[in-house]
Each structure stands twice: as structure tokens, then as C-alpha cells.
Amino acid sequence: MTPAQCKVIEAAGTTAYRLASGPGGWVERLGDDVIISYKHDAARDEMGAGLDAWCAKAEWRPVRVFHRFMPIKNADRICPVLHSGDAALPLTTVVTEAGIRYGLDIGASYSHGLFLDQRLNRAKLQALKPKRVLNTFAYTCSFSVVAALAGAETVSVDLSRKSLDRGRENLKLNGIAESKHSFIADDTMELLAQLAAKGEKFDAIILDPPTFSRSKSGRRWQVEDHFEDLVNAALEVAAPKCAILLSTNCTKLDPNSMERRARWCAKIKRRAAEYMSLGVPVDFPAGHGASTLWMMVR
Ligand SMILES: C[S@@+](CC[C@H](N)C(=O)[O-])C[C@H]1O[C@@H](n2cnc3c(N)ncnc32)[C@H](O)[C@@H]1O
């Protein structure tokens, strides 16, 4: 991204975005800080030199630069490591996206708390002004925040209570009271079955699962194997005119194959739907970011 392109993003009230992306990693600006995520040392050094040159042109310097090694296996990933800047500064920080505030924690895990590639989908959800939103695999609840700001009641579900607590904080950061928002630490598939049994309906549903996980009860989640189960279960709680966001980082599932599989689910559940993909934000080149698809159920 050129400094001029970054100024356009910043003028829209966004301080968290990708500065650069390449085959060996990527560089993110997170408010005053920068994280260089790298797959090998040569890529880290190249991106570091690129960042220095970019900063000279942009007349901006990050307060801190962190390095984050990204081995292929999630289990091998660790928190970003401070490369330059004051080690006494807190590892928690607040960034904005379209003026909306999100708390990040660079010391919490390898993931700081906000998936920047979902910017367009968060804006879309907010623009849809849904009344009742089910945010599954909610993580730090960024989709619940935008829905709440649009006036929705939200239900956020995630296996991780800690992530949901961060979601609560994100609502607070934006002056949203908790009264219309619930946070459920549970397995998404189990909760979907319970919601369907109670006859609950939602007019927007976020389905952004990890590629693989295992719940506390030992239930194994593998997105390629369970994608249809998830969409079918979501359709059981989809109100008429429900907008369902399908999203994955699994390279085996691109928007075309997601659409093919989602069409099959709609047929089984006798629901008509239209499909649209917003792609990725301007700071993400092709091949970077999650594959996402909106299934607009009639
Ligand atoms: C890809 S992140 C979701 C990102 C989120 N949609 C966002 O935009 O910030 C995946 C999340 O799913 C949660 N998770 C994994 N398996 C789960 C399951 N079976 N049920 C509920 N949550 C699960 C993880 O704890 C993690 O927070």
C-alpha cells in the first residue's frame, strides 16, 4: 500500500489495516504499532527493510514493531515478540475501524484479536441493520459489535470464555450496554441444535469457523467435513430474509466450492437463496484473506 492509499483508509476512521503482503508474510499497522508476520527469517528481514523505506516516504514511524513467526501448524504459533520500541508499554491497545473501537492484546496469543480481512463483511452486516444476530465462532465478537451498533440484539457463541470476555469489553469500548447481548461459551453445533429446538430465529448469522478444533467434550470440528452440517443447522434457525455469512481460511474451500455446497444445503432445507461475495479489502491482494460468501436466504 502506498502512503496515499493508507491515508484514504485512515480518513475512513480505520487505524488497523495491512501495509504490505507477500509470499513470505505480511505487515499490519495496528494503531501506533506494527506487526511483521513472517514464514521464514529472510522474509522477516525483507519486510523489515521494506517497512523502514515505507516509513521514510510516509513520514510516520510506528511506536513499536513486533515480529510474529507463522509456522504452518496453529499449535506451533506463539505471541508476537517485541523487535523495537519501549518494552514497558502495555501489550493491550485500541484500534479503530470505520470509527468503531476494538481492543487488541498483542500478548494474548499469536492472534491479536481482530481479523482485518473481515472489514467489508463487518460493514455489510452493519449496513443490513439486522434485528437479531447469531454470531457463531465469535472470537472477540467484532461482528456482534457492528450488529449492536446497528441496533441488533446479538447472541455470540465461542468455545473460549476468555475470547467472549474480550467481546464484552469490545461492546463496552463502544458504549454498548450488555442488556440485549448474550455470550455463550459452548460448541457451536451443540448450541445451534438447542436454539432450533427452542424455535429461535435470527435474521443474520455469522459462520466463520476455524479449519480444525476440538471442543471440551472431545467433539472434533473439521471444516471440510462439517461445512454442510453447519450450514444445515444454521438454516434451521434462519428467519425469512436471513443473511448468512460463510467464511473460512481453509484453502480447500474457495467461494465457488462454498457456494456449491451451500446451494445443496438450501435445496435439502427447501430454502431459496442468493449468493454474493464482497471479496477482500483493498489492502489484501488476491490469495490473501479468508474466503467469504454471503448467502441471502429468502
Ligand atoms: C476464525 S476464529 C473466528 C473469528 C471471528 N469470526 C472474527 O471475525 O473475529 C475461530 C473461533 O472459533 C472458536 N471455536 C473453535 N471451535 C469452536 C466450536 N466448536 N464451537 C464454538 N467456537 C469454536 C475459537 O475459539 C475461535 O475463537
Image (cartoon, helix red, strand yellow):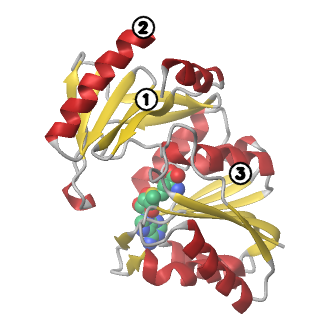
What is the tally of numbered marks visible in this picture?
3
Seen at 24% across and 59% down, the residue is 72
- Which of the marked residues, 3 or 2, is nearer the chain's N terminus? 2
Query: Which residue is disc 3 drawn over?
Result: 125
Query: Which residue is disc 2 drawn over?
Result: 59
Which three-letter amino acid code belongs to the residue tagged 3? Leu
Seen at 67% across and 38% down, the residue is 176
- Residue 39: percent from left, percent from top: 23, 47
| Cβ of mark 3 under 8 A from ligand 1 | no
CA gap between label 1 and label 3 equals 23 Å
CA gap between label 1 and label 2 equals 17 Å
CA gap between label 3 and label 2 equals 35 Å
Judging depth in this view, the residue of 27 and 181 nearest the camera is: 27
Query: Which residue is disc 1 drawn over?
Result: 30
- Which of the marked residues, 1 or 2, is nearer the chain's N terminus? 1
Which three-letter amino acid code belongs to the residue tagged 2? Glu
In the picture provided, is 96 more to the left or to the right than 147?
left
Judging depth in this view, the residue of 149 and 195 nearest the camera is: 149
- Residue 11: percent from left, percent from top: 64, 20
Question: How many residues crowd mark 2 within 10 Å: few (<14), some (14–19), many (20+)?
Answer: few
Question: How many residues crowd mark 1 within 10 Å: few (<14), some (14–19), many (20+)?
Answer: many
- Residue 165: percent from left, percent from top: 47, 48
Which three-letter amino acid code belongs to the residue tagged 1? Leu
Q: Is mark 1 on a helix, strand or loop?
A: strand
